[in-house]
């Protein structure tokens, strides 16, 4: 990856995290932990990989992104705003009555959102439908779907996986944000997803693994997934819940809790320090 591009992606991801914290703090509710763990992948998709146009968000030929773990929309909103789909100031009224940005993605009210999501397991099913529609119509767009690791405990995920393999949806790339934590504790303790790679292989997927915070790995892995023919791909992305904010990292309590004023200041100060270092 070109060094200038790598630098820009790192800076943008830091800004995505800053706006994520801004949104959750002003909403006084939300899900910072899983939003922060997904920030780098979303940054890569929206600022490097996907064919999207903020001036024409409903372009039929655009690539699609479905945030199946819809509760982590603060990071999606930040990426969309920074990409130019709507003003960043909208993030300051996240979850407020009458505001555009809701607590889960709304495809009817938010430019750039391709699918309303939030009921875990359903997003990946919608993504399968989009990918099949492309196949049937001869369109060449690609569909990316991001799932949470805890979400993969939902049976509907595996029904969708069977569907994707049956219809040979090689234009579908699923990404599992595997940060190891969910609302009730560690994924391993709640239900366990041991050998998730082998599970997806058994369901007919080509499986890849990567560090979800390393842009060069993200690029390399997505390029490999795009080259797969005849079956869907899934990328198991190892991530850190709360990435970028020291007191949130690997802490299950930050799954669905907003920071108070002091915690907000600490988070913003840390992220601004990181951003200044990247801009130096």
Image: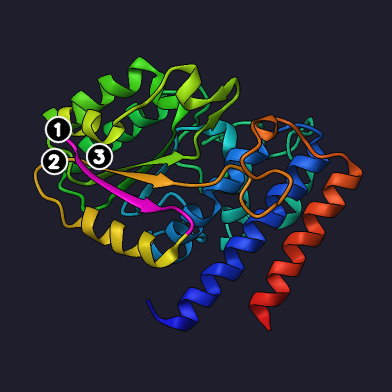
Q: Residues within 10 Å of mark 1 (few under 14, many from 20)?
A: some
Horizontal and vertical percent for residue 201? 18, 34
Is 207 contained in the magenta span?
yes
Horizontal and vertical percent for residue 46? 47, 59
Which range of residues does the magenta coloring cover? 205-213
Horizontal and vertical percent for residue 158? 28, 22
* Left or right position of 6 against 277: left
| Sequence order check, earlier mark of 1 and 3 | 3
Which image quadrant is residue 182 in?
Answer: top right
Please tell me whether mark 3 sits on a helix, a strand or a loop. helix
Which image quadrant is residue 273 in?
Answer: bottom right
**Location of mark 2 (residue):** 231
Q: Residues within 10 Å of mark 3 (few under 14, many from 20)?
A: many
Task: Give the Cα separation between the discs numbered 3 and 2.
Answer: 12 Å
On screen, 262 above or below 222?
above
**Location of mark 3 (residue):** 131
Task: Give the Cα separation between the discs numbered 1 and 3.
Answer: 16 Å
Which image quadrant is residue 105 in?
Answer: top right
Check contact, mark 2 vs mark 1: CB within 8 A.
yes
Horizontal and vertical percent for residue 186? 53, 27
| Sequence order check, earlier mark of 2 and 1 | 1
Foreground residue among 141 and 109: 141
Front of the two marks 1 and 3: 1
**Location of mark 1 (residue):** 204
The main secondary structure of the magenta stretch is strand
* Left or right position of 267 against 106: right
């Amino acid at each position: 990856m070109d060094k200038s591009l790598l630098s820009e992606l790192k800076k943008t991801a830091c800004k995505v995290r800053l706006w994520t914290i801004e949104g959750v703090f002003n909403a006084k509710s939300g899900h910072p932990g899983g939003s922060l763990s997904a920030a780098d992948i979303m940054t890569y998709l929206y600022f490097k990989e996907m064919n999207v146009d903020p001036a024409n968000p409903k372009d039929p030929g655009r690539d699609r992104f479905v945030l199946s773990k819809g509760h982590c929309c603060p990071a999606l909103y930040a990426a969309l705003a920074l990409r130019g789909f709507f003003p960043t100031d909208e993030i300051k009224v996240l979850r407020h009555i009458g505001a555009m940005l809701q607590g889960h993605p709304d495809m009817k009210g938010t430019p750039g959102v391709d699918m309303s999501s939030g009921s875990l397991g359903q997003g990946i099913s919608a993504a399968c439908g989009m990918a099949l529609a492309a196949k049937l119509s001869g369109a060449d767009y690609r569909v990316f779907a991001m799932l949470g690791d805890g979400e993969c405990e939902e049976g509907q995920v595996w029904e969708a996986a069977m569907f994707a393999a049956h219809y040979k949806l090689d234009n579908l790339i699923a990404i599992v944000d595997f940060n190891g934590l969910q609302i009730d504790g560690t994924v391993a303790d709640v239900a366990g997803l041991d050998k998730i790679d082998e599970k997806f292989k058994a369901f007919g997927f080509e499986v890849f693994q990567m560090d979800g915070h390393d842009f060069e790995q993200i690029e390399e892995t997505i390029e490999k997934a795009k080259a797969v023919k005849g079956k869907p791909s899934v990328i198991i992305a190892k991530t850190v819940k709360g990435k970028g904010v020291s007191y949130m990292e690997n802490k299950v309590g930050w799954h669905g809790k907003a920071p108070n004023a002091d915690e907000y200041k600490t988070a913003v100060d840390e992220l601004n320090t990181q951003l200044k270092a990247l801009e130096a």
